[in-house]
Image: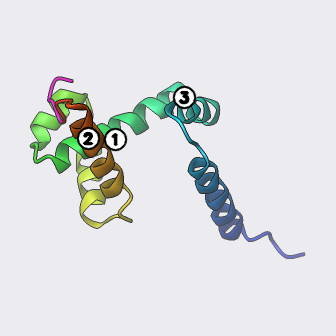
Amino acid sequence: MDKPDVGSALDSDLKLLAAAMAVVNTRQEAIALLSDLCTPREVTEMARRLRVARLLSAGRTYTQVQQATGASSTTVSRVSRTLASGQGGYAPVVKALDLEDDDRGAPNQQLGA
């Protein structure tokens, strides 16, 4: 009997997750989906990595980012590497969030915020 192709199943599951994320229309829907899919700790860690990406993209140093976010040096380094040579997922999100902050007149990339 042949073994199931786990890689193919994971790829299919990833595509399903991406499709689910793409149909989310509001922040409330996004929060509900994240809350249903992930543990509170997983959501916190993903949010922290996104904040790290925003601060690194704004030119903050590793030390500044660690102090502002509480992220470990490993997390900051991993996000930095991903920004430099990952799949390109952070860049459009960071740009959109920064533009949104600009549109609202919000001070983007505050270290203590």
Marks 3 and 1, the one that precedes in the sequence? 3
Q: Position of residue 101 (x, y in %)?
A: 25, 36
In the rendering, which numbered label is found on residue 11? none
Disc 2 designates what residue? 52
**Quarter placement of the N terminus:** bottom right
Secondary structure state at the residue bearing disc 3: helix
Q: Nearer the viewer, mark 3 or mark 2?
A: 3
In the rendered view, does 23 fall on the left or right side of 56?
right
Residue type for callout 3: Gln
Q: Is residue 85 magenta?
A: no
Q: Residue at x 25, y 43 (%)?
A: 98
Q: Quick check: can you spot residue 72?
A: no
**Quarter placement of the C terminus:** top left
Whether 92 is drawn above or below 50: the answer is below
Question: Where, by quadrant of the figure, is residue 25 drawn?
Answer: top right
Q: Are marks 1 and 2 in contact (CB under 8 Å)?
A: yes
Q: Are marks 3 and 2 in contact (CB under 8 Å)?
A: no
Marks 3 and 2, the one that precedes in the sequence? 3
Residue type for callout 2: Val
Q: Position of residue 78 (x, y in %)?
A: 29, 51
Disc 3 designates what residue? 28
Whether 58 is drawn above or below 84: the answer is above
Residue type for callout 1: Arg
Question: Where, by quadrant of the figure, is residue 66 drawn?
Answer: top left
Query: How far apart are the two marked residues, 3 and 2, measured between alpha carbons?
Result: 22 Å
Q: Is residue 111 magenta?
A: yes
In the rendering, which numbered label is found on residue 49? 1
Q: Nearer the viewer, mark 3 or mark 1?
A: 3
